[in-house]
């Protein structure tokens, strides 16, 4: 491999250096000295970098030599063989070293592309080489006809040509950088070619030594890490793939470690700013609650309850995320935390994203808590004003122990006498500000303990990054006695038979959901689609059964009526949109039909499917699909055979990227330069462990060993605090 020549590129003092650097009167730099401030030199100081290139780099966010060196490749092209022209084989990428004999520019008839055609030859043969849209090369070749060209020999019709992907002029100082050996590929912007980036990087390479390595040396030794400078050089200019891989790992590990430290430091900080009232140990009321349950908690539920007990005993507010698949029994755990709050003389609040869910939680909690003498109230947008007033008054005076509500809880200026535990269900539907608005106490008062819940299983890679600032509990065990939901793909020609099956179930006294296709563009369209399906079924396949319609745009009273009718078993079928995705619980519903299944993400389908299989009866989930989309079919087939929400979430993550799953919170992760969550999960776990270990030894990273690390965290992820506050 060819390394760029090293000599002579340090900038002369006193010429165009930033004033503050000049003022320091640095001695002329020796090649051996390490001077991090040299990384601040503008890219313009590199030889051969003109104003246009500087501007184009700026568009990529690269202004200094340091930025440039951190602009890392996203992959490396394997080496192309260097062969003689005679040895070129059609269809195989190779590099030839040739002399340009003659060239001409032609314009293609169809699309008007400018094509540069040149006859090139070495001592074995001659071939017609072709470049697209690079007619300006004619002049360059006239001056220096010796070139290295990397490309592919194409034979079409009777014609043979060598289509050049990249080339370089021999003797221009960067021989082989672009065509021979492993070639790093950079994320380039439209105007700045990968080739220019590589050339300029060649000039910047000697500066790599000026990077301070933030990793403590003991850690480096333990992991067998390259130094930062070595890793950067090896990544930009690897001799072989394993070198590139080792270098990438080193850089990715550093990045993930800094991120984990930033997250954990942020959590410490948030907790230091907020104090909470430790709750006394569980007593008679809590015992009565546990006794009153109609079932024995699973081992996973017991484990989470004891994790919560641990949190509640501390003088800092609990910040725990409870994840559990649909039906895993999160509600009883949440109720446990609420009872603990009331027993300690305080109050509990549950905030949920939809009114349907609010009604349901309120009804269930009321049934469980009333026998314990705890008054539970519901607070939502459309309620008689007198009810709302009464609830608010009860909360302010402490008469009401538990309140369940929608956004109304925060919009209507509810004050609590003593809020001790707040539960936020489907927490990803709320922003941090909304959650804080619920829990922020009057000045000087303690913060409540907060339990966030989500039924969307989050792969550990994501929860460690997105929610790295929360403690995470997982209920990874379903209550006993559940029969898995039978899931089947149904093709158009099987629809009649499917509806016959649905009718049979309904006739046997079961109930069914029919979920309408997802229309992401507009709620109005979505509602229209649901209405159409509803009308059609009511008059057609499901004539004779009571069918109800539920979608987000119905007036609240109609929504309520539809839900009630279905919940009470008066309606046999609920035609609905994804409003039922969260939390609706009708154990007698044993069949779910999902129209246009391919439009949903697997996690979302999993949420929907979780609405059936809640009772003793064997349940079915039927996915309507077409034959004509193989990708969709294989996704749906995976769904049909997988009941594990975490596996499905990972599949979604692979197929659709992180952003699709978790929206705003991940936007801050767009900043990862080297690491990739899925690919680097092993490194991520290692980084998390290392971060926890380092902070155990040095809680704010102020000791001498971690000093450089702390600075690097600040420099690289200062914005973490910012996006955690926003998301
Ligand atoms: P999630 O909110 O996690 O989706 P729920 O809390 O709604 O799940 O629980 C689903 C159903 O399982 C409820 O009907 C609940 O009463 C029941 N359940 C919860 N825990 C247990 C358990 N340990 N044993 C039996 N049934 C349980
Ligand atoms: Mg639930």
Image (cartoon, helix red, strand yellow):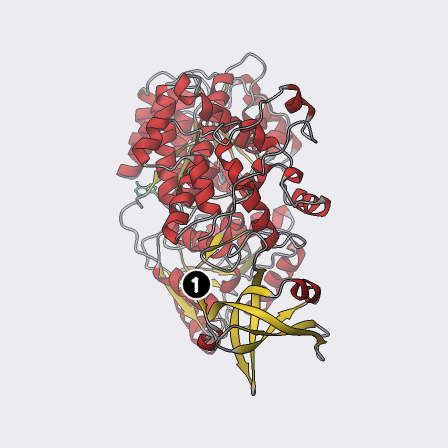
Between 352 and 456, the one nearer to me in the picture: 456
- Number of numbered discs overlaid on the protein picture: 1
Q: At which x and y percent is residue 637?
A: 39, 65
> Can you name the residue that lies furthest to the bottom here?
158
In the image, is the residue at mark 1 within 8 Å of ligand 1 by its beta carbon? no
Report which quarter residue 724 is drawn in.
top right
Between 283 and 49, the one nearer to me in the picture: 49
Q: Is residue 674 left or right of residue 302?
A: right
* Label 1, residues with CA under 10 Å away: few <14, some 14-19, many ≥20: some
Q: At which x and y percent is residue 504?
A: 39, 69
Q: At which x and y percent is residue 125?
A: 51, 78
Which part of the image, by quadrant, shows the C terminus? top right
Q: Which residue lies at the image location 51% right of the left edge and 60% below the top edge?
A: 179
Q: Is residue 53 above or below residue 422?
A: below
Q: Is residue 226 above or below residue 396?
A: below
Q: At which x and y percent is residue 187?
A: 57, 51
Q: Is residue 509 visible?
A: no
Q: Is residue 219 visible?
A: yes
Between 546 and 102, the one nearer to me in the picture: 102
Between 299 and 619, the one nearer to me in the picture: 299
Q: Which residue lies at the image location 34% right of the left edge and 30% below the top edge?
A: 219
Q: Which residue lies at the image location 44% right of the left edge and 19% below the top edge?
A: 700
Which residue is denoted by mark 1 in the rendering? 635
- Secondary structure state at the residue bearing disc 1: helix
Q: Is residue 443 above or below residue 251?
A: above
């Amino acid at each position: 491999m060819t390394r760029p020549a090293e000599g002579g590129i340090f900038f002369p003092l006193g010429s165009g250096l930033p004033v503050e650097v000049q003022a320091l009167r640095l001695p002329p730099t020796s090649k051996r000295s390490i001077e991090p401030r040299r990384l601040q030199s503008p890219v313009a100081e590199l030889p051969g970098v003109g104003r246009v290139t500087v501007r184009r780099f700026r568009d990529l966010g690269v202004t200094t030599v340091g930025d440039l060196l951190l602009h890392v490749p996203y992959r490396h092209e394997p080496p192309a063989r260097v062969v003689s022209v005679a040895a070129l084989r059609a269809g195989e990428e190779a590099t030839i070293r040739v002399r340009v004999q003659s060239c001409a520019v032609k314009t293609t008839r169809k699309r008007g592309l400018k094509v540069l055609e040149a006859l090139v030859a070495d001592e074995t043969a001659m071939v017609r080489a072709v470049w697209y849209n690079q007619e300006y090369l004619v002049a360059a070749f006239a001056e220096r006809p010796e070139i290295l060209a990397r490309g592919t020999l194409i034979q079409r019709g009777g014609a043979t040509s060598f289509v050049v992907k990249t080339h370089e002029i021999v003797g221009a100082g960067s021989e082989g950088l672009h065509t021979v050996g492993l070639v790093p590929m950079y994320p380039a912007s439209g105007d700045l070619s990968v080739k220019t980036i590589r050339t300029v990087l060649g000039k910047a390479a000697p500066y790599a030594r000026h990077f301070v390595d933030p990793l403590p040396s003991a850690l480096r030794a333990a992991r067998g890490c390259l130094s930062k400078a070595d890793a950067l050089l090896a990544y930009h200019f690897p001799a072989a793939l394993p070198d590139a891989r080792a270098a990438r790992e080193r850089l990715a590990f550093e990045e993930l470690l800094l991120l984990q430290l930033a997250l954990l430091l942020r959590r410490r900080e948030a907790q230091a700013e907020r104090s909470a009232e430790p709750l006394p140990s569980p007593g008679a009321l809590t015992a009565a609650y546990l006794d009153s349950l109609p079932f024995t908690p699973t081992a996973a539920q017991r484990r989470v309850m004891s994790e919560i007990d641990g949190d509640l005993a501390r003088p800092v507010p609990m910040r725990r995320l409870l994840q559990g698949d649909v039906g895993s029994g999160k509600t009883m755990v949440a109720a446990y935390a609420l009872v603990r709050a009331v027993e300690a003389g305080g109050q509990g609040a549950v905030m949920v994203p939809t009114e349907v869910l609010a009604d349901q939680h309120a009804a269930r909690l009321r049934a469980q808590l009333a026998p314990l003498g705890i008054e539970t109230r519901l607070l939502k947008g459309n309620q008689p004003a007198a009810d709302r007033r009464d609830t608010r008054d009860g909360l302010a005076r402490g008469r009401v122990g538990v309140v369940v509500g929608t956004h109304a809880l925060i919009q209507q200026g509810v004050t609590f006498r003593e809020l001790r535990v707040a539960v936020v269900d489907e927490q990803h539907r709320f922003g941090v500000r909304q959650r804080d608005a619920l829990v922020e106490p009057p000045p000087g008062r303690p913060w409540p303990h907060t339990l966030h819940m989500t039924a969307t299983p989050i792969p550990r890679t994501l929860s460690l990054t997105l929610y790295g600032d929360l403690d995470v509990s997982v209920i990874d065990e379903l209550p006993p006695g559940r029969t898995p939901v039978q899931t089947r793909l149904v093709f158009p020609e099987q629809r009649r038979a499917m509806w016959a099956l649905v009718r049979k179930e309904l006739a046997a006294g079961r109930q069914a959901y029919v979920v309408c296709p997802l229309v992401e563009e507009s709620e109005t369209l979505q509602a229209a689609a649901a209405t159409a399906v509803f009308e059609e079924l009511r008059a057609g396949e499901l004539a004779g059964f009571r069918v109800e319609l539920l979608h987000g745009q119905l007036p609240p009273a109609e929504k309520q009526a539809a839900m009630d009718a279905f919940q009470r078993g008066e309606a046999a079928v609920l035609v609905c949109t994804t409003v039922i995705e969260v939390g609706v619980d009708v154990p007698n519903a044993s069949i779910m039909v999902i129209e246009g299944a391919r439009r949903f993400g697997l996690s979302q389908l999993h949420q929907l499917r979780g609405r059936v299989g809640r009772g003793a009866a064997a349940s079915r989930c039927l996915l309507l699909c077409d034959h004509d989309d193989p990708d969709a079919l294989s996704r749906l087939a995976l769904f049909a055979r997988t009941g594990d929400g975490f596996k499905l979430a990972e599949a979604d993550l692979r197929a659709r990227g992180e952003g699709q799953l978790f929206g705003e919170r991940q936007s801050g992760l767009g900043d990862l330069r080297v690491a990739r969550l899925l690919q680097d999960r092993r490194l991520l776990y290692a980084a998390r462990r290392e971060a926890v270990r380092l902070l155990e030894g040095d809680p704010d990273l102020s000791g001498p060993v971690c000093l450089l690390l702390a600075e690097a965290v600040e420099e690289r992820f200062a914005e973490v605090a910012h996006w955690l506050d926003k998301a």
